[in-house]
Every structure is written in C-alpha cells, then in structure tokens.
Image: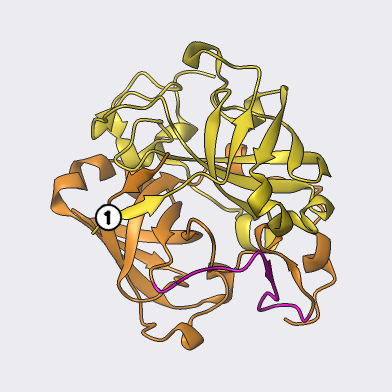
Chain colours: A yellow, B orange
Amino acid sequence: MEHIMKPIGVIHSPFTDKKQTPIQPTRSNQSGWVEVFPEYAEGLLGLEEFSHIILLYVFHQSDGYKLKVKPFLDDKIHGLFATRYPHRPNPIGLSIVRLLSRRENVLNIDGVDVLDGTPLLDIKPYVPDFDVFTDVKTGWYAHRSKE
Amino acid sequence: MEHIMKPIGVIHSPFTDKKQTPIQPTRSNQSGWVEVFPEYAEGLLGLEEFSHIILLYVFHQSDGYKLKVKPFLDDKIHGLFATRYPHRPNPIGLSIVRLLSRRENVLNIDGVDVLDGTPLLDIKPYVPDFDVFTDVKTGWYAHRSKE
C-alpha cells in the first residue's frame, strides 16, 4: 500500500549544494525560513510560542538507497536505519530547529541544515516531555571516527 | 508535486482502538514490536546498539484534518501544527521509543503509543547530540489544562 504525501511548504536555506550542507541542525549556525503555503497558514496559530520545532521534509535530492552505508561521521559501514543518512527507502528528513519568529505563513528559523528548496511535509512542536531522553546509548556514534 | 511513500514494516502494539492509545510514548508503559519487512532487514545492522529509536509512521486511521484543533491535553483551540494531533495534511507520526532488543528483522520496543498494525515509514537512531534541546519554551503545552 502506498501513501501519497504532498508538500505543505518549502524550507529556504543558504545551502544550494549538498556538499555545503551541515550534517545536523546542531552543527549549523545558519538561519533560514520556512514558507508554509498560505492555505495551511491557519494551522500555525500559536506555534510562535514554542522555541523549537520539528520539521519533517523530503530529501528531494536523494535518489535510491543502499541498506548498508558509511555515514558522514564514521569510516565504518553500518545499517542504514542505524544512521541519519539521507538516502532512504522513504526519504523523509527530520530536523529540530529553533523558531525565531513567525509572520503569518513564514517562520524564521535558526540552525537550518537542509538544502534550499526542500519540500516540507509537516511541522510539530518540540516538547521535552515527549522528545527528551537521557541515559541513552548511541552505538557506533559514541565511537565515531569523525567530528 | 507528490511524494509516494511505501511502508518498510509494521508496528505491533496492544492497542486496537484509537481511544485506548496513549497520547505519547512517554505516557505508555506498554511493549510492542516492530516488524521490518525482510527485504529491509540488512539496514538494521547495528541498530541494536542504540537504546532509543525514532519511528516515523503513517497515522493510518486518520482521515482528513482541520487546521485548528483542540488537542487531547488542552481545552483551548490551537493551530494544528502547534500540536501533535494525528489528523494532519501529511499524516506522519513520530514516536521515540526504547529499543529493548533486535532479532533479525524484528525489534522489541517499550513505550509504544501507536495502534496495532501501524505502517512504518522509517527508523532513525535517537542521538542526544542532534535531538536533545534544553532551555525550551513550549507555548500552550506549558499551560495545558489536562495531564
């Protein structure tokens, strides 16, 4: 069974080339903006009172995937689902970014790590009660070969 | 432009009715299991060394959406994207769960909050360096009317 997803907006960033793009939002000091298509603007009501938001988007320059990959931060091969590598069976990306402000259907964000023009699928508020876990084990990442 | 997503597995839980389902994984003490379809099993290599994983899935019993909703935890109306409400333009759910063990293509998980039979779209490792933010403001949630 297939599920059809239709972008609700576009993420804008300074990055126009995959090679420039930071590995994660926490490694980016760049600002960007999210344009939510006007027909969805009403759904943003109150979002500006959250300091952090979860963006779900399409890795639109991803084509195909391999089930074993060498992630950017290591020189060993790992299972794709044990990495955040962008080439995936369902190329959905997840970034948590700081929300600086909202003006109608436009969100100004900090810590952007995606390509300019990335299709946005969903926005969720970041809520520590749901999203923060401590006492976490991180497998290969804890022993990664690169920073 | 449309993006077609095809499930890579199924999430199994004790919940067969939407009304029974916990609001978030952190509010669930139930165990469940993720069946990744055998053709993707190789992509799970090394995932068992992570204690927590991010599941992206389809809210398959969601039909339609409203842009303003009253979330489960409040009695006021908020913009849909300022909530984790399941009825969304792209009905993608996100849960962070504890990974207890892996046996080939089957993952045993704790803290499951989804309906039995939920179509799985992606699995990502939970990495505090990318996913934990402190000093966070949570808008209406901080002043919610329900627990």
**Which image quarter holds the C terminus of chain B?**
bottom right
Residue drawn where x is 68% and y is 36% of the image: A34
Residue drawn where x is 31% and y is 27% of the image: A63
* Depth check, front residue: B128 or A45: A45
Residue drawn where x is 65% and y is 52% of the image: A39
What is the quadrant of residue B34 in the picture?
A: bottom left
* Depth check, front residue: A58 or B104: A58
Q: Is residue A61 above or below residue B39?
A: above
Few, some or many C-alpha atoms within 10 Å of disc 1 (few <14, some 14-19, many ≥20)?
few
> Which span of residues is magenta-colored?
B61-75
- Image spot of residue A43 (x, y percent): 69, 58
Q: Is residue B32 above or below residue A60?
A: below
**Which image quarter holds the N terminus of chain B?**
top left
Q: Magenta stretch containing residue B66, yes or no?
A: yes
Residue type marked 1: Glu
Asked if residue A95 lies left or right of residue B47, the reply is: right
Asked if residue B30 lies left or right of residue B127, the reply is: left
For disc 1, the marked residue is A2
* Depth check, front residue: B101 or A101: A101
Q: Main secondary structure of the magenta part?
A: loop
The chain carrying label 1 is: A
Q: Is residue A27 above or below residue B35?
A: above
- Residue B132 seen in the figure: no
